[in-house]
Image (spheres, rainbow, N blue to C red):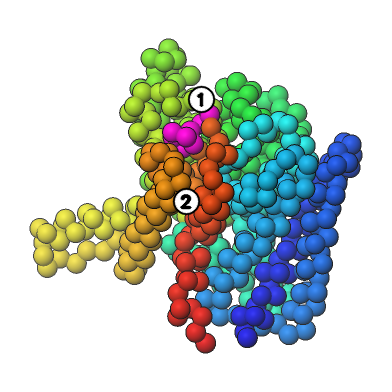
Amino acid sequence: MRKLKLLRIPIFAQGIFVPMLIPPILYAALNGERTMLPALVFPALIALTLSVPMLFLIMRGPAQMRGRDGFFLVSLTWIFLSLLGSLPYYWSGAGIRFTDAVFESVCGFASTGATTISDIEALPRSLLLWRSISHWTGSMGIIVLTVALLPLLGVGGFQLIKAETPGPEKEKIAPKITQTAKVLWLVYFTFTLILFFLYFAGGMDCFDAACNALAILATGGVSTKNEGLRYYNSAYIDVVTTVFMMLGGLNFNLYFRLLRGKIKDVFYNTEARAYFLIFAAACVIVTVKIFPLYGSAATALRYAAFQSASILSTTGNVAANYELWPPLAQAVLFTLMFIGGCSGSTACGVKVIRYTVLFKQAVNELRRMIYPRGVFTVQLNSKIGRKDVVYGVAGFIFLYFFIVIVTTLFTAASGVSLFTSFSAALSILGNVGIGFGGVGPMQNYGFFSDSVKWLFCFVMIAGRLELWTVFVLFSPEFWRN
C-alpha cells in the first residue's frame, strides 16, 4: 500500500514534461510547423492531466519515503517520461513507428547518441529541438530537478538523488538537497549558455547552436545534421566541442569546489587526474597512428582528441570516420568504450573512479603477496576509502559486463553479427551511441528488430541509472514489507 501511495510521486514528476515542451511548441507556432503543434501540445496536456491531481494528493497526505524507495521512484519516473516523450516523435507525421519513437525518447532521456532515423534533416525543426531538450534535461537528471520541489510537498529528496546520480559514492555539496540541485543546475545551465555563444561565434545559426549546445553538454551526441558536427568541417567547432565534452564528463561537484576557491580539491582529485591521464594517453597514441592519413600533426590531433573525448565522455558524436583509421587507433577508441566519464558527471559507462578503485586494490593485493602481514588500504583524494566501496565496485563491474554478455547473446540471436552485437551492447549500456561494425560512425540502429530495440531501451535506462537502481526492483526482498 505504501508503494502504491509513492506512485503519486513519479506521476507528479510528469509535470516537468510540460516546461520542457514549451520551447518546441513556441518554435513550431512561430515558424509555421502547424502539423507539429498537436504532436507537442497533446503530450503536454496528458502530462498536466496526470500531474496536477497527484500534486493535491501529495500535499494532502505525503507518504513516508525510505531509502530504498528512491530506486523504485526513479526507475518509474524514467520509464513514464520515456513513454510520454515518445509521443511527439510518434505523432509528428514523420513516419516514425512507435517502437522507434520510444527508442528515440529513451535515447534522449538516457543521453545516448544513438538513433534509428536515417534522415535527421527531414524532421521538423521543432522535433529536433525537443530531441536536444530531452537529452539536456535527462542527462543532468530529471530527479535532480524534481527533488528541488519534493520538500515543498513534504517528501525528502536525498533518497532520489542517490538513486539517480552516477558513481559509487554520493555527496551533498550544500547543506540541503534542494540547494545541491540548484547549484548543479546553475553550473550546468551556465556551461550550456557559454557553449551556445561559442557555437554561434563559430558560424552556427541560433537554432543549430542551441540544439548542439544542449546535446553536447548533456554528453548526448545528437545533432541537427545527418553528418553531425562533421557537416561544419570546422577546426574551431571541433576544438570547442572537445573541450566541452571533457567538461561534461567531469564530476560537477568539482566545479562547485572550484567556485568556492578550493582549487587543490580539483587538482588533487584522484578520479579527475586519472580521467585526463586516460584522455591524454589515448590522444597521443591515436594521433601518432593517424598522422600518415592526414599529413598534419594538428589535424591528426584534432580528430584524435575529438573522438577520444567523444567516446570517453560517452557523448557519441563523430568528427571523422574512425573505422578507416589504423587498427591500433580503433582499438584505443574501442577500449575507451569500456571506461566512461567521471562519477557525478553527465557521462555514463562504468566510470573512471571504479577502475581507479580496482587498480589500487590490485596493487594492494600484489603488495600483500610480498608483505603478508601488511595492512593496505585504498586511498582516494588522499583519504582512506571505505572497504565496502571496493566490494560495491567489484559487484557493479561484474553485473555491468554480465549485462553486456546477455545483451550481446540476445542481439546475436536475432541474426546480427557477433561483433556488431557486442559493440552495440557495449555502446547501449554505456550510453555512448556509436560503436563499430553495424553501429559504426556512419550507421544507425534502425536495422535492429523491434524486440532488440525494446531490450536496448531497457538496457539504456539501466545503464543511465547505474544498474542497481533498476535491478534491485527484481529482488523479492525489495517488495517485502
Is residue 170 visible in the rendered image? The answer is yes
| Amino acid under disc 1 | Ala
* Magenta extent: 435-442
In the displayed structure, does residue 78 sit left or right of residue 383? right
Residue 383 drawn at (x, y percent) = 35, 62
Residue 95 as seen in the image, left or right of residue 301:
right
Pointers 2 and 1 in contact (CB under 8 A)?
no
- The residue lying toward the viewer, choosing from 321 and 380, is 321
Per the rendering, the mark at residue 213 is none
Q: Is residue 462 left or right of residue 367?
A: right
Q: Nearer the viewer, residue 459 or 141?
A: 459
Q: Which mark is residue 429?
A: 2
**In the image, residue 101 above or below residue 442:** below
Q: Nearer the viewer, residue 184 or 468?
A: 468
Closer-to-camera residue (359/407)? 407
Tell me the quarter of the picture where residue 324 sits. top left
Where is residue 443 shown, x and y percent of the image? Answer: 53, 32
Q: Residue at x 85, y 42 (%)?
A: 35
Q: Is residue 201 above or below residue 265?
A: above
Q: Report x, y in % for residue 377.
A: 26, 64
Quarter of the picture holding the N terminus: bottom right
- How crowded pointer 1 is (Cα within 10 Å; few <14, some 14-19, many 20+) is rated as some
Query: Upstream in the sequence, badge 2 or badge 1?
Result: 1
User: On the image, numbered disc 1 is attached to which residue?
Assistant: 320
Q: Is disc 1 placed on a helix, strand or loop?
A: loop
Does 375 lie within the magenta span? no
Closer to us: mark 2 or mark 1? Answer: 2
Which quarter of the picture shows residue 336?
top left
Residue 182 appearing in the image: no
Which residue: 10% across, 58% down?
370
